[in-house]
Image (spheres, helix red, strand yellow):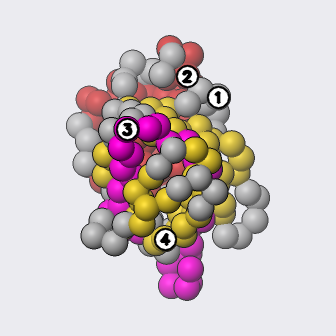
Amino acid sequence: MDEHSLVTLGLHLQALRKTQGFSLSQLASAAGIAKSNLCRLEQGNGNPTLDTIWRLAVQLNVPFGTLVAPISVPLGEDGVQVQLIDQGKGVPQVDAYWMRCAPNTLRHAEAHTPSTRETLTLISGWLEVGPEGATTTLTPGESITFQADQPHLYRTHTDEATLLLTVTYGQEGTPP
């Protein structure tokens, strides 16, 4: 992520944290990261992983897209890039992303908030995706929807995969 995007993310994260009444220590502990790392991130000096950003969004009880909305560049690590395309304004909250997975990528994603679903449509390449132990292989033009409130994975082989991803956030106690 470029310096401007890191500063933008840090300021936005700090504003969300303060609005919700979290101290640095409280949010860092809840998200399972070091307080010093959270402090650096808020100052625009960190280098957050996708999982760190997801954990912070979960602890702040905001969609991932809300946390990254001010950033206009793709976020990425270990062969995976995601970029927010749009956020829905209704209920349930739906975020749309462009996603690219480099060849020979295996990405394990942590469970999202309760009742969250992902819907993926593969644009190009080949992708194995879904809850760990129950994955599905997609070819271009195919789609899948699965519960993302459990650990899941994305795996490519020799070709990169590009896809559209929507994340639908459920409300606890509400069927997906």
- Report the residue marked by disc 4: 146
Question: Within 10 angstroms of label 4, few (less than 14), some, or many (20 or more) residues?
Answer: some
The image quarter in which residue 106 lies: top left
Three-letter amino acid code of the residue under disc 4: Phe
Residue tagged by mark 2? 5
Alpha-carbon distance for marks 3 and 1? 29 Å
Element class at badge 1: loop
| Residue in the image at 75% along x and 65% along y | 90
Measured in 3D between alpha carbons, the distance from the residue under mark 2 to the one under mark 4, in whole angstroms, is 31 Å
Depth order, front residue of 31/15 = 31
- Three-letter amino acid code at the position of disc 2: Ser
Element under label 4?
Answer: strand
The disc, 4 or 1, on the residue closer to the chain's N-terminal end is 1
Q: Residues within 10 Å of mark 1 (few under 14, many from 20)?
A: few
Left or right of 109 on screen, residue 169: right
Residue 39 horizontal side relative to residue 167, left or right: left
Q: Looking at numbered disc 3 in the image, what kind of residue is underneath it?
A: Thr
In magenta stretch: residue 34: no
CB atoms of marks 2 and 1 within 8 Å: yes
Residue 76, position in %: x, y? 44, 32
Label 2 vs label 3, nearer the camera: 3
Q: Nearer the viewer, mark 3 or mark 1?
A: 3
Q: Which residue is mark 1?
A: 72
Residue positioned 57% across, 44% down in the render: 124
> Between disc 3 and disc 1, whose residue precedes?
1
Report the amino acid beneath label 1. Answer: Ser
Residue at the spot x=59%, y=61% of the render?
142
Q: Which residue is mark 3?
A: 158
Vertical order, 18 against 136 (above or below): above
